[in-house]
Amino acid sequence: MKIITRMLEDEVYEAANAAGHTVRIDMRDASVKQNQSPVELLLSSVSACAAVDIVIMLKKRRKMIHDFTIETTGVRKDDPPRRFTDIHCLFIITSPDVTEEELHKVSALSLEKYCSVAATLNSKITFSVQVVRPQ
């Protein structure tokens, strides 16, 4: 796998994969920032990686998913390198037939076994789940 990252302007970069798909990376001050920073993208990557696994596992079980949101928070060290020491994912699924026990089980499988991003990090990653019944 190869990613090419190039500077567009001070503190703004664009990363492209081999297929030409791009993402902008923005390290500017919050008042002018238009895209996620590298560390924000890392948290986004953890949650997206886990979400893909979770949805695949639930669909294999023939579960209905109306909505799926992941709230991911990270705690970073104060001293450089300011790596994440703790990451928590709250998986919130709206489904008529998924149980919290089931969501917990597939979330654990994703973060502890299948998610490449989580496996790459040297952080404690925890999670919680929430099932919302459709109205």
Image (cartoon, rainbow, N blue to C red):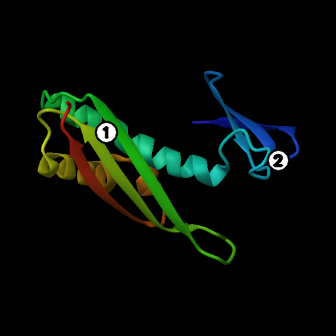
Towards the viewer: 113 or 103: 103
Label 1, label 2: how many angstroms apart (C-alpha)?
33 Å
Q: Could you say where residue 119 lies in the image, as x and y percent from the top left?
A: 41, 56
**Which residue of the protein is positioned furthest toward the right in this rendering?**
10
In the image, 66: left or right of 27?
Answer: left
User: Where residue 133 sits in the image (x, y, percent)?
Assistant: 18, 37
Q: Secondary structure at mark 1?
A: helix
Mark 1 or 2 closer to N-term?
A: 2
Q: Is residue 51 left or right of residue 60?
A: right
Q: Check disc 2: other Cα within 10 Å, few if <14, some if 14-19, many if 20+.
A: few
- On the image, the x and y values in percent for residue 121 come to 48, 60
Which of the two residues, 8 or 2, is positioned nearer the viewer here?
A: 8
Residue 106 horizontal/vertical position (percent): 21, 46
| Residue, disc 1 | 53
The residue lying at 14 percent from left, 39 percent from top is 98
Image quadrant for the N terminus?
A: top right
Q: Are marks 1 and 2 in contact (CB under 8 Å)?
A: no
* Residue to which mark 2 is pinned: 11
Foreground tag (1 vs 2) = 2
Question: Which one is nearer the viewer's eye here, 119 or 123?
Answer: 123
What type is the residue that disc 1 sits on? Asp
Name the quadrant of the C terminus: top left
Residue 66: image quadrant is: top left
The residue lying at 43 percent from left, 40 percent from top is: 48
Q: Amino acid at mark 2?
A: Glu
- Tell me which residue sits at (29%, 52%) in the image: 113
Q: Quadrant of residue 132?
A: top left
126 is higher (above) or lower (below) than 102: below
Q: Is residue 78 above or below residue 39?
A: below
Look at the picture and state if 56 lies above or below 27. above
Q: Residues within 10 Å of mark 1 (few under 14, many from 20)?
A: some
